[in-house]
Image (tube, rainbow, N blue to C red):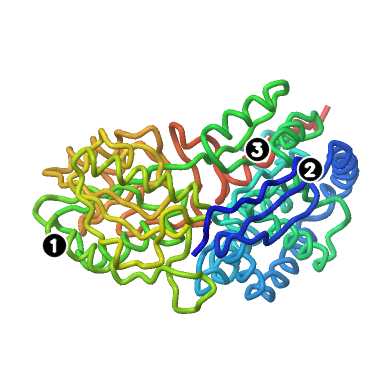
Amino acid sequence: MVAPHQHKTAAKTLQCISPVDGSIYVERPLNTLADIDAALVKAKKAQKLWRHLPLAERQKYMQKFLDHMVGKAKDIGEEITWQMGRPISQTPGEILRGFQERVKYAINLAPKALADIVPEGQEGFKRYIRREPLGVVAVIAPWNYPYLTSVNAIVPALLSGNVVILKHSHQTPLVASRYAEGFRAAGLPDGVFQFLDLSHEDAEKLMADPRVDYVNFTGSVKGGHAVQKAISGKFIVAGLELGGKDPAYVRADADLHSAVENLVDGAFFNSGQCCCGIERIYVHEKIYKPFVEAFVELTNQYNLGNPTFPDVNLGPMVRASAADFVRGQIADAVKKGAKALIDENNFPASKPGTPYLAPQVLVDVDHSMSVMMEESFGPVVGIMKVKSDEEALKLMNDSPYGLTACVWTKDLDAAEKIGQEIETGTVFMNRCDYLDPGLAWTGVKDTGRGASLSVLGFEALTRPKSYHLKTKA
């Protein structure tokens, strides 16, 4: 197993330490302030031409880019596994499923999303609202779903006539390289897409530069505040997705088998390192016992181990410190009265001081415990018994976050009624941990602001410009 690595990153060097075995998987120099300036000069020049290219031409570039990426899915999947630890049996799917679905949807949606808005006719005038590109879009992307989080902004931004500068996580730097390779293969004009490897301080300087017109950031609440501070000297907007503590409510009338199967996957896929992963579950007392028993039985079927092995379906967390944080949450909950239902001895690969952590199911939990209130971002979930919809709703809303929430029931009216009162960006019924490209991806409270995907995602990447043209004297 992996011991805590001793490597120290030099101030001007990026190092990706693989959670698989603690080795240095990628190492390369960080870009400088001079590189930022050069990239922005090139971007501003490129955008003047790119914005005037017909949308149909921009769509063709995106389709060629997608074709290239799909053709490289196997290689890309292997890189994801080594960079952040997700099992090799699952990583190619990031390109072949979600990434491909979202790019295709954006390409097809663009003509509608970017079409002129024409008000009712007025004789003697031609009037319409056009969606103009913002200019230079800076995308600051995370490691946990390195393509799915970044593509939500990159492709719609380019389709809208913007140019993009990507700063990806130091944990997944090869993702930025793959984007660049894909756009080169598609023949994208020079300067329309660029990437920079930057320190946190220099990333803030990039965002603060007056030549950057929009920032898309996915990361922590602390990081979101840093973004807002960086752009505070100018009047631009940042799209911020800052995480969640997503709840599930299993009503008494739920399909028990389906709820268990999907919620176990929603809690533990990607080792729980999902912005919209299930982190807390409220179950009606009438089905609480059979739900917990089935949940534990299915959780015990995971195979934790080296993610490069094809039979492994639960890999390490991204780093030992992240696993230690979750271990600390579990220990704190148990100390306060929670009961841990998974015997860690059933997962011999799980070792203290390493990124390898067994999945854990906690009962007898309450909201005085960190594991029920603070984002875990790991393979642990707490399950609470509730007596009514009202009690479940109160607990679901008792959170500083609001990304997604799901209700498991056969009653559509009940799900919609409960959904109206949940403080969240997305309400699911009988599913979870999924992004529908036709719906806005958004959140409330400390989850952030703004929207990606859907027509609203295009709106965030454009500005309205009104044309009021008098045609008759």
Q: CA distance from mark 3 to mark 2?
A: 59 Å
Q: Which residue is more in the foreground, 258 or 196?
A: 196
Q: Residue pushed farthest left?
A: 286
Above-or-below relation of 450 to 82: above
Amino acid type of the residue tagged 1 in the rendering: Pro
Amino acid type of the residue tagged 3 in the rendering: Gly
**Foreground label between 3 and 1:** 1
Q: Which residue is mark 1?
A: 290
Pick whichever of labels 3 and 2 is earlier in the sequence.
2
Q: Which residue is more in the foreground, 225 or 183?
A: 225
Q: Which residue is mark 2?
A: 12
Which residue does the image show at 70% across and 46% down from the upper left? 9
Q: Secondary structure at mark 3?
A: loop
- Res 128 quadrant in image: top right
Q: Secondary structure at mark 1?
A: helix
Q: Which residue is mark 3?
A: 121
Which residue does the image show at 62% across and 29% down from the upper left? 226
**Residue 155, numbered circle:** none
Which residue does the image show at 46% across and 60% down from the upper left? 270
